[in-house]
Image (tube, rainbow, N blue to C red):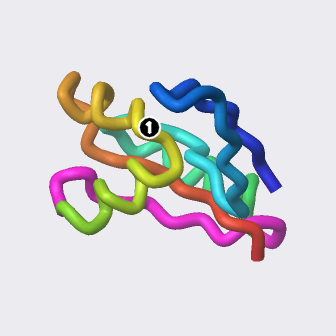
Amino acid sequence: MWFAFVKSPLGTNVRVSKAFIADVNSNEEDELLKGKLCGVYDVKVLDASMLDNLYTALILDPDVADYVRLGVKLITVARVS
């Protein structure tokens, strides 16, 4: 489990998730990362240009939107398998 402490207008809250964003990039290094995390985590590489994928990543970390604005095309998400 991963815990993220988030400050909001209503005060600090905690997000609990069984997934995390392992990498954000726009190149082919994802296969190497998938090989390292395979067996322990279920790894998916999401195309950030698709709205459903972007929504999935934003639930885990709202700051991903800033990376997408900077040109990141691939988001690697790892879930506990």
* Point 66% across, 38% down: residue: 13
Q: Secondary structure at mark 1?
A: strand
Residue 4, by quadrant, is top right
Residue 45 lies in the magenta-colored region: yes
Mark 1 Cα within 10 Å, few/some/many (few <14, many 20+)? some
Q: Position of residue 80 (x, y in %)?
A: 76, 68
Q: Amino acid at mark 1?
A: Val
Task: Say which residue label 1 marks.
Answer: 24
Q: Position of residue 23 (x, y in %)?
A: 53, 40
* Point 50% across, 49% down: residue: 30
Residue 65 lies in the magenta-colored region: no
- Quadrant placement of the N terminus: bottom right
Q: Is residue 42 above or below residue 6?
A: below
Q: Position of residue 34 (x, y in %)?
A: 62, 58
Q: Is residue 69 above or below residue 59?
A: above
- Quadrant placement of the C terminus: bottom right
Q: Nearer the viewer, residue 59 or 32?
A: 59
Q: Position of residue 18 (x, y in %)?
A: 72, 63
Residue 43, by quadrant, is bottom right
Q: Going by the image, does 53 lie left or right of 15?
A: left
Q: Name the outermost residue toward the front.
A: 10
* Point 19% across, 61% down: residue: 51
Residue 19, by quadrant, is bottom right
Q: Nearer the viewer, residue 69 or 12?
A: 12
Q: Going by the image, does 60 lie left or right of 27?
A: right
User: Which range is magenta?
Assistant: 39-50
Q: Going by the image, does 12 lie left or right of 70?
A: right
* Point 52% across, 50% down: residue: 60
How many marks the image carries: the answer is 1
